Image (cartoon, grey):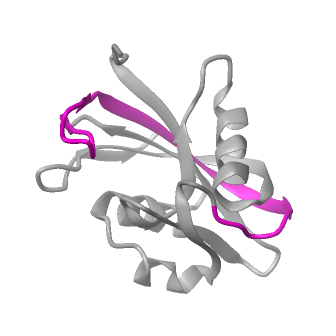
Amino acid sequence: MAWPTHIVAAGGYVFDKKGNILIVKTHNRGWDCTGGQIEVGENIEEGVLREILEESGVRASVRCLVGIYSNVGQHMHYDEVTHVPTKVMFDFICDYVDGELKTSNETSEVIWVPKNDVLNYITAPASALRFKNVIEFDGRIHYCSYISKPKFKVLSSRFV
């Protein structure tokens, strides 16, 4: 399979009416937001809402764009055979609509966490950066480029 130059992905940071944030425990990255690659024929908002539902059982609505990220590092996939292309990710703050929490083939746990406690769960440096930007969101869109492997390093960070 030939990979594209960039993978386009989206992250969904879902909040309930109490201000709790939805997190999922993934098999490879530990605790994280819901999200993933945008599929052919999908727009980015449709893709993030599909990923939220698939990974958590929750239907959500998009409130706003909060961040745009470029992971420009090149590394091997978890299979240690496939080279992963660079990624462009769009992060959205979303609102809970309905649905019961349930796991998927990509998630082993799905929970609501108080917003102020969420960083206690997140161990991957890139995910922690993105969650921090969601928690501190003041209406400005954050743009950041970084590499995640072999060691996490921010290359640029600003508001757009």
User: Which span is picked out in magenta?
Assistant: 74-103
List the single residue furthest toward the left: 150
- Placement of 34 over or under 10, stated as above or below: below
The residue closer to the viewer here, 38 or 27, is 27
Q: Position of residue 145 (x, y in %)?
A: 29, 41
Q: Is residue 23 left or right of residue 153?
A: right
- Placement of 147 over or under 74, stated as above or below: below
Q: How many marks?
A: 0
Query: Which residue is depicted at the point 78% across and 81% down?
Result: 18
Query: Which residue is depicted at the point 53% across and 42% down?
Result: 36
Q: Position of residue 19 (x, y in %)?
A: 72, 78
Q: Position of residue 138 (x, y in %)?
A: 58, 61
Query: Which residue is depicted at the point 37% across and 23% down?
Result: 6
Q: Is residue 22 left or right of residue 120?
A: right
Residue 126 appears in which quarter of the rendering? bottom left
Quadrant of image for the N terminus = top left
The residue closer to the viewer here, 45 or 23, is 23
Instruction: Specify whether residue 81 is painted magenta.
Output: yes
Q: Position of residue 106 (x, y in %)?
A: 53, 55
Query: Which residue is depicted at the point 61% across and 18% down?
Result: 40
Residue 31 appears in which quarter of the rendering? bottom left
The residue closer to the viewer here, 77 or 38, is 77
Instruction: Specify whether residue 83 is painted magenta.
Output: yes
List the single residue furthest toward the right: 98
Q: Is residue 68 left or right of residue 64?
A: left
